[in-house]
Image (cartoon, rainbow, N blue to C red):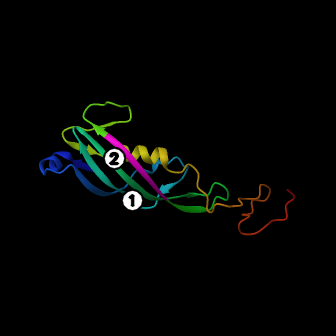
Amino acid sequence: MVIDVRKLKFSGKTETDFQFDYIPSNELLTLPGAFFDGAVKVTGVLELHGDDVYVDGTIACAIVGDCARCLRETRVDCSEEFSVVYAVTRQDEDDYLYKNGLVDLKLAIDDLIITSLPTVIYCQEDCKGLCPICGQNLNEKSCDCKK
């Protein structure tokens, strides 16, 4: 996920589209036992503004993990937009640094995965969960336990 800004400058352009497939570590997910179902798709636009590089894009991925209410394995599609700035020298604490004309999107994408993907997933919005007494999945059938 490295973009060579020197080539962009040499071509006389100030903007370029990009698209990458990225296989991140499952350790980036905060959900216990969750994993990525395939690659994270990263698309966006990179723009030059003097020495600064502005990157706007979207990540799209699927996560598999256990529903927080009924424990059923569940696949969730996620999508998140992002905007980041790369600078040669840090001007703002949110800026990412680049050097030798190479912008590496990996750290920004990893940060985005950590901070913006779900920390809880549900098999369905109105999941009824498990009976606290007998453990019956209440989405499948009711139980006769005294609540």
In the foreground, 6 or 15: 15
Residue at 85% in and 65% down = 144
Residue under the image location 22 percent in, 37 percent down: 51
Residue at the (43%, 46%) spot, across then down: 112
* Mark 1 crowd level (few <14, some 14–19, many ≥20, 10 Å Cα): some
Please state if 91 lies on the left or on the right of 60 as rendered. Answer: left
Q: Tag 2's secondary structure?
A: helix
Q: Amino acid at mark 1?
A: Ala
Residue 138 rendering spot, x and y as whole percentages: 74, 64
Assign the magenta stretch its main secondary structure: strand
| Residue linked to disc 2 | 106
Image location of residue 84, percent across then percent down: 36, 43
Q: Nearer the viewer, residue 50 or 110?
A: 50
Could you say which quadrant of the image residue 37 lies in? Answer: bottom left
Left or right: 7 with respect to 35? left
Q: Secondary structure at mark 1?
A: loop
Structural distance between the alpha carbons of marks 2 and 1? 13 Å
**Residue 122, located in which quarter of the rendered image?**
bottom right
Q: Is residue 18 above or below residue 52?
A: below
Q: Which stretch did the figure color magenta? A: 78-85
The three-letter code of the residue at mark 2 reads: Lys
Q: Is residue 100 magenta?
A: no
Which residue is pictured at 31% across the width and 31% down the height?
A: 90
Question: CB atoms at circles 2 and 1 under 8 Å apart?
Answer: no
When the figure is inspected, residue 41 is found, relative to residue 49, above or below; the finding is: below
- Seen from this angle, which residue lies furthest bottom? 141
Q: Residue furthest left?
A: 10
Pinpoint residue 147: horizontal percent, then vertical percent.
Answer: 85, 56
Residue under label 1: 39
The tag earlier along the polypeptide, 2 or 1, is 1
